[in-house]
Image (cartoon, grey):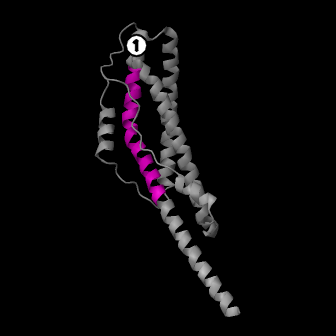
């Protein structure tokens, strides 16, 4: 009887070791995608900072009664989106309960950060979509210009928040993963965004 119970326990332990290993691999793969997304946002930062400076100059010209001088369309920064689906699945499953507590806490912190980063990216996209109204200055009312000034302030503030968030991800919440480079299309989109609008 004791031998049978021991054998059953050994089989169960082997089963959960396999399940935890599979869960860990999936979480690491998804962590790499999120770390890569953060690294892509860091690569965008100089271009976003320069674009914001150009928009500020356009506002200065408009305030003096001059055209903004923009010769290229204002678009939102390209984004590299990553998911947290593996973590959501892990939380609803049982394998996570068999993972060492310290490791589980590290994954929890990392994926909470990834979700916060994804939310900020969505908010940032919304702000830049609003700023794209600058592509049609001829139809803007005085009230529209006021709202665009506010949107510009939000974009500046969001850019600073992104610097803090991406720094944390790339220094603290990597889960041992290194970012991968985007494909040719990602590089092309970034190059197009980085070109001056003047």
Residue 148 position, x and y percent, is 49, 19
> Which residue has dot 1 on it?
137
Q: Is residue 125 magenta?
A: no
The C terminus lies in quadrant: top left
Q: Horizontally, is 97 left or right of 24 in the view?
A: right
Does 43 appear in magenta? yes
Type of secondary structure dominating the magenta stretch: helix
**Residue 197, horizontal then vertical, whole percent:** 32, 24
- Which element is circle 1 on? helix
Image coordinates for residue 13, horizontal then vertical, percent: 60, 79
Q: Report x, y in % for residue 194.
A: 32, 33
Name the residue at 40% across, 33% down. 48
In the image: residue 33, left or right of residue 111: left
Judge from the rendering whether residue 148 lies leftward or rightward of residue 71; answer left or right.
right
Magenta residues, start to end: 29-57
Q: Is residue 5 left or right of residue 194?
A: right
């Amino acid at each position: 009887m004791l031998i049978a119970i021991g054998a059953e326990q050994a089989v169960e332990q082997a089963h959960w070791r396999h399940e935890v290993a599979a869960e860990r691999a999936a979480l690491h793969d998804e962590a790499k995608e999120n770390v890569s997304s953060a690294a892509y946002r860091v690569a965008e930062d100089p271009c976003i900072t320069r674009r914001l400076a150009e928009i500020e100059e356009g506002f200065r010209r408009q305030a003096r009664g001059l055209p903004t001088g923009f010769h290229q369309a204002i678009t939102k920064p390209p984004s590299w989106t990553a998911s947290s689906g593996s973590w959501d699945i892990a939380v609803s499953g049982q394998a996570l309960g068999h993972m060492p507590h310290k490791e589980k806490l590290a994954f929890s912190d990392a994926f909470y950060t990834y979700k916060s980063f994804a939310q900020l990216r969505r908010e940032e996209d919304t702000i830049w979509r609003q700023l794209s109204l600058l592509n049609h200055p001829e139809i803007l009312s005085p009230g529209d210009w006021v709202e665009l000034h506010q949107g510009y302030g939000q974009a500046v503030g969001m850019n600073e928040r992104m610097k803090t968030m991406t720094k944390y991800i790339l220094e603290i919440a990597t889960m041992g993963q290194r970012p991968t480079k985007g494909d040719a299309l990602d590089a092309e989109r970034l190059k197009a965004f980085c070109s001056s609008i003047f």
